[in-house]
Image (cartoon, rainbow, N blue to C red):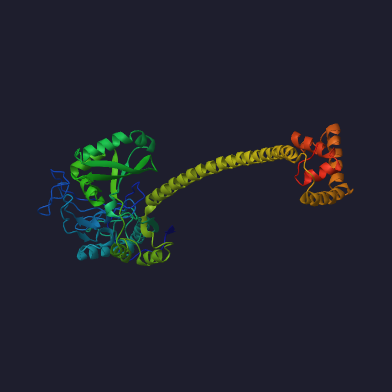
Amino acid sequence: MAFNFGAPSGTSGTAAATAAPAVGFGGFGTTSTTAGSAFSFSAPANTGTTGLFGGTQNKGFGFGTGFGTTTGSSTGLGTGLGTGLGFGGFNTQQQQQQTTLGGLFSQPTQAPTQSNQLINTASALSAPTLLGDERDAILAKWNQLQAFWGTGKGYFNNNIPPVEFTQENPFCRFKAVGYSCMPNNKDEDGLVVLVFNKKETDIRSQQQQLVESLHKVLGGNQTLTVNVEGIKTLPDDQTEVVIYVVERSPNGTSRRVPATTLYAHFEQTNIKTQLQQLGVTLSMTRTELSPAQIKQLLQNPPAGVDPIIWEQAKVDNPDSEKLIPVPMVGFKELLRRLKVQDQMTKQHQTRLDIISEDISELQKNQTTTMAKIAQYKRKLMDLSHRTLQVLIKQEIQRKSGYAIQADEEQLRVQLDTIQCELNAPTQFKGRLNELMSQIRMQNHFGAVKSEERYYIDADLLREIKQIRHLSTKEMKYFLLGLPISS
């Protein structure tokens, strides 16, 4: 996010900056609605003036959570992308959609008024004639300071009203351009965002009551079902709830109500009043922008933003496929974005803590599993030795009374060779004697260090002692895995 107190821009605007708690894309301004008396998804639109919800309206659309509204014949960004909608039921055709671009990214057509305003602003900043002496120069500097700050009134002539300085004036220095993430949801997904002036814990504890209340707002139609897509905490103890509505037809099929249709219904005057009683402070759609809309928004700098800064913001966009530049006017908007950033940082940290706890739990499980694997390996070795002893006894009984065969004679030769190796001082028997000596010393003197202690399994120790007492012939048979004759 870039923040620049740069040179003033060459354009002017009349939008008043407002801050709202939502982070996503929503209406920047006001939306005019025409309330209807009927609410039905099954009745087709006949005249184009009565929509699915009984009324028509222009859908508010924009980025962020509100950068202001305009007066006169120009609407704010919230109503700039207006859509005339008429909706029917399942087997009806949608009325022709009309989309216009205006508001924050369009300039009013009142050219003479703007020209006079620019002339008055220039007179107030450079050559006021209010007092007619050297004090007018001091007044000009004071007017410049107010214009740079974005507040106050600039007096310059006794016969002309003063100029009102707002943060949208082209000379205000407290402006910057940030970036907002563009949604990738389609209108058919039906996602609508409702911002409640309540804590997340209160919303979650009363989620069922909230769903029932929203169903009543929709007219209590049994073919409609309200579903909650997600709940997220916002700064200043506010909560964002994403919902969608599913409509069931008589033949058993179902579909999601388009986001524009649901939003148009929520923006009707009487419905909006009911939502405000539930604690809703803001509603907006969460739908993706078309390439034409993105192009139109990027080509027209917002009111009061220097075109050079706007072009540089487009160049500095870290991800033009997912992010779009949005203006930040004044410290109030900067503070709002800072709170949102802090909130997202806390959510990320919470998620990292959960992941860390899961990793710790997995590490404990891994340690336990490795210990069990080692235990089972020792048990397998013990069972293998016991099985070998059983096989030896069985082989002894099977070969009892038979003469030595040729293959057994070959085995005897191999056993003699192995016996010679075992009797060598530096081979296995000598090492076994050395190991037994060390075991006796440890049993007598104890471990050298308290933290370094070595133990030998009792069964293994017994087996070592048994091997030491074997005769040469028995040792040969043992090493070859043959039964040891008694």
Q: Is residue 383 visible?
A: yes
- Where's residue 57, x and y in %? 18, 51
- Where's residue 443, x and y in %? 83, 33
Q: Determine the residue located farthest toward the left in the rendered image.
A: 47
- Where's residue 452, x and y in %? 77, 38
**Placement of 82 over or under 346, stated as above or below:** below
How many numbered marks are there? 0
Viewport quadrant of the N terminus: bottom left
Can you tell which quarter of the image residue 206 is in? top left
Q: Determine the residue located farthest toward the top in the rendered image.
A: 444
Residue 330 appears left or right of 448: left
Front residue of 369 and 289: 369
Q: Is residue 27 visible?
A: no
Front residue of 110 and 413: 413
**Placement of 2 over or under 373, stated as above or below:** below
- Where's residue 401, x and y in %? 78, 39
Front residue of 464 and 147: 464
Viewport quadrant of the C terminus: top right
Can you tell which quarter of the image residue 463 is in? top right
Q: Residue at x 16, y 55 (%)?
A: 93
**Placement of 472 over or under 151, stated as above or below:** above
